[in-house]
């Protein structure tokens, strides 16, 4: 069940991961294309600011004096130097400001750290014939540092007279500052190219890209239309996607490229997948718990039912009631308990019927001898013994008459306990006369217990067993004690000092009693098991008994009966 539940979860996670990865990949590409367009606009504004710096001389009031050829040299020199210094101080990233006059005159303003010899590697040619071939913007190297050069020819309008060439060289600090908002330096890489020959202006990586990086993958800008796109590739051993934006400024082609590693997109997909898996694991745990609860609630009643069936097979019908359930298993358990209860009742009824048959047979045998005839005959013998002054014989015959009259009276099945006490009193008196000094006995009873209603003939069979095991099969001398008390119930205790019973025999007798079978044949007439079964039939679960035995010291049986009001 768990496997069937888990496999769809795994498959759904795989499908979800792949679809999430593709969806996130497209979202990342679209988001970065928009970001690069913003970066392109910022770059164009920056180039416009640099362009405005180069034409700022046209706003000077002394520009007319500068354009006249007959202007004093010192005045011209002062004008140029002042404007160069002003340009140099306007932006912190400006490294060099150079001016070539139309007459090859040169003046410049530069950083103190840059020597004049180093300037020769980056400055444009002084020949005015080569100025037309100079691009408005280009990338130049100065001592390993990449600089952006802005070249502007100064012309005296409307005469179209060439006054000179102004060149401004700026570091890439501002370009880097603009690009820092466009990417994550720890994960992504930025490239910026200018001019038609794709000069590398800026890169955030220490490694330089190959020239084919842009030439093979970036669509050229035409018709004044910005271009965007992407392609999948590799950078420094990492797979990922290149997103680019191409545009132009004053006929200057500009291209910004951003490399995004696959791990960045995977991380987002993994986060989404992790949340999904966490939710699914919680759901799976709930399913497992629910499956366990359902299995437990299904299997436990079935096991309980099987155990009850095994008890019934052994003849044990006392099944503990189960917790009421409203489902099909609960109905099955209740029906089974009802069936066992009915079966127990039928067995008890059958037991009663067989007991009644047995009782009827006894009555039939007893009826063969007229009880009144026996009683009258014994009375005549007792009278004759009195005439011959044999009083003891007369007493014994009288006691025997009481015993026979009580035991053969079939009109009652239950009697007050006092009648049972009188009966065993006569019986013990006869036995004491028989065994003389070999038998001693003591009978004590709580007065409140004498009126209790009990089945007939429950004390005499037990006392008889005590005499047989204590004197006839014992040491030859026996002591019998009968003690009856009443508190919350009736407790009858009968003990002797005979040979007793082994613990195994006691356990076997308890097992026989637990089966509640019909009367079994026992030697010597009505035996102990007969008494116990008749008490159980009469009192049911309100009757309990226990037995302990210490051979030749004390063997005791206790009959405990919870009396109801009508039996008290």
Image (spheres, rainbow, N blue to C red):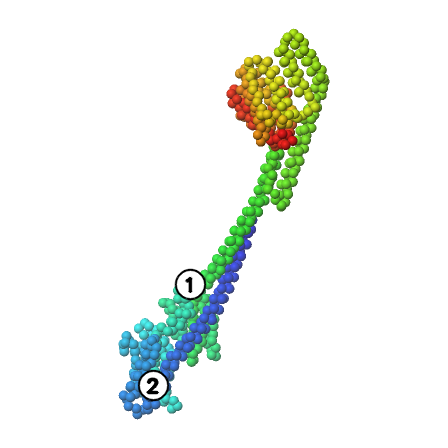
Which element carries disc 2, helix, strand or loop? strand
Asked whether, in this view, residue 170 is left or right of residue 244, the answer is left
The residue pinned by badge 2 equals: 164
Q: Residue at x 33, y 72 (%)?
A: 145
Q: Is residue 134 visible?
A: no
Which element carries disc 1, helix, strand or loop? strand
Q: Nearer the viewer, residue 456 or 84?
A: 456
Where residue 258 sits: x, y (%)? 43, 69
Where residue 122 sits: x, y (%)? 32, 77
Where residue 140 sits: x, y (%)? 34, 76
Where residue 69 sits: x, y (%)? 31, 91
Asked whether, in this view, residue 517 is left or right of residue 142, the answer is right
**Image quadrant where residue 479 sits:** top right
Q: Nearer the viewer, residue 358 or 434?
A: 434
Residue 420, above or below 124: above
Q: Residue at x 55, y 47 (%)?
A: 292
Sort mark 2 into few (<14), some (14-19) or many (20+) by Cα contacts within 10 Å: many
Q: Nearer the viewer, residue 545 or 358?
A: 545
Q: Residue at x 47, y 62 (%)?
A: 268
**Image quadrant where residue 334 sits:** top right
> What whole-number distance in Å separates the C-alpha atoms at marks 1 and 2?
49 Å
**Image quadrant where residue 329 sits:** top right
Q: Is residue 171 visible?
A: yes
Residue 402, above or below 153: above
Q: Nearer the viewer, mark 1 or mark 2?
A: 2
Asked whether, in this view, residue 563 is left or right of residue 274, the answer is right
Image quadrant in which the C terminus is located: top right
The residue pinned by badge 1 equals: 238
Q: Earlier in the sequence, mark 1 or mark 2?
A: 2
- 1 and 2 marks in contact (CB < 8 Å): no
């Amino acid at each position: 069940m768990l496997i069937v539940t888990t496999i769809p979860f795994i498959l759904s996670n795989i499908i979800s991961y792949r679809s999430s990865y593709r969806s996130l990949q497209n979202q990342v590409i679209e988001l970065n294309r928009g970001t690069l367009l913003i970066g392109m606009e910022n770059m164009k504004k920056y180039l416009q600011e640099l362009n405005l710096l180069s034409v700022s001389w046209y706003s000077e009031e002394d520009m007319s004096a500068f354009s006249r050829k007959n202007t004093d040299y010192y005045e011209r020199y002062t004008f140029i130097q002042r404007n160069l210094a002003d340009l140099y101080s306007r932006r912190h990233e400006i490294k060099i400001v150079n001016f070539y006059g139309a007459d090859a005159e040169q003046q410049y303003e530069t950083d103190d750290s840059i020597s004049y010899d180093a300037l020769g590697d980056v400055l444009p040619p002084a020949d005015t014939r080569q100025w037309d071939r100079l691009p408005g913007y280009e990338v130049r190297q100065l001592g390993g540092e990449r600089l952006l050069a802005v070249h502007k020819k100064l012309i005296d309008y409307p005469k179209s007279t060439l006054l000179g060439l102004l060149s401004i060289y700026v570091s890439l600090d501002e370009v880097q500052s603009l690009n820092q908002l466009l990417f994550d330096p720890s994960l992504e890489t930025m490239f910026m190219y200018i001019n038609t020959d794709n000069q590398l202006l800026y890169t955030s990586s220490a490694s330089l890209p190959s020239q084919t990086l842009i030439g093979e993958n970036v669509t050229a800008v035409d018709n004044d239309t910005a271009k965007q796109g992407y392609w999948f590739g590799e950078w420094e051993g990492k797979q990922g996607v290149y997103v680019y934006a191409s545009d132009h400024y004053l006929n200057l082609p500009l291209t910004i490229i951003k490399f995004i590693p696959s791990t960045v997109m995977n991380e987002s997909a993994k986060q989404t997948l992790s949340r999904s898996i966490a939710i699914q694991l919680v759901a799976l745990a709930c399913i497992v718990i629910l499956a366990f609860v359902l299995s437990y609630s299904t299997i436990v009643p079935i096991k309980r039912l099987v155990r009850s069936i095994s008890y019934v097979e052994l003849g044990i019908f006392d099944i503990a009631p189960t917790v009421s359930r409203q489902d099909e298993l609960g109905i099955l358990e209740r029906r089974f308990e009802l069936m066992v209860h009915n079966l127990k009742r039928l067995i008890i009824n059958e037991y009663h019927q067989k007991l009644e048959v047995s009782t009827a047979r006894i009555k039939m045998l007893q009826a063969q001898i007229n009880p009144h005839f026996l009683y009258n005959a014994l009375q005549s013998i007792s009278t004759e013994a009195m005439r011959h002054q044999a009083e003891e014989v007369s007493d014994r015959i009288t006691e025997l008459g009481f015993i026979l009259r009580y035991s053969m009276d079939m009109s009652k099945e239950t009697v007050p306990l006092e009648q049972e006490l009188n009966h065993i009193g006569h019986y013990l008196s006869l036995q004491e006369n028989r065994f003389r000094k070999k038998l001693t006995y003591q009978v004590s009873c709580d007065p409140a217990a004498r009126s209790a209603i009990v089945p007939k003939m429950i004390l005499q069979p037990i006392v008889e067993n005590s005499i047989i095991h204590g004197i006839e099969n014992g040491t030859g001398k026996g002591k019998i004690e009968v003690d009856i008390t009443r508190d919350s119930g009736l407790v009858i205790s009968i003990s002797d000092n005979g040979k007793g019973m082994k613990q195994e025999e006691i356990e076997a007798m308890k097992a026989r009693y637990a089966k509640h079978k019909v009367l079994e044949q026992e030697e010597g007439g009505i035996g102990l098991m007969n008494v116990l079964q008749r008490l159980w039939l009469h009192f049911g679960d309100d009757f309990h008994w226990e037995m302990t035995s210490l051979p030749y010291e004390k063997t005791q049986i206790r009959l405990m009966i919870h009396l109801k009001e009508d039996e008290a």
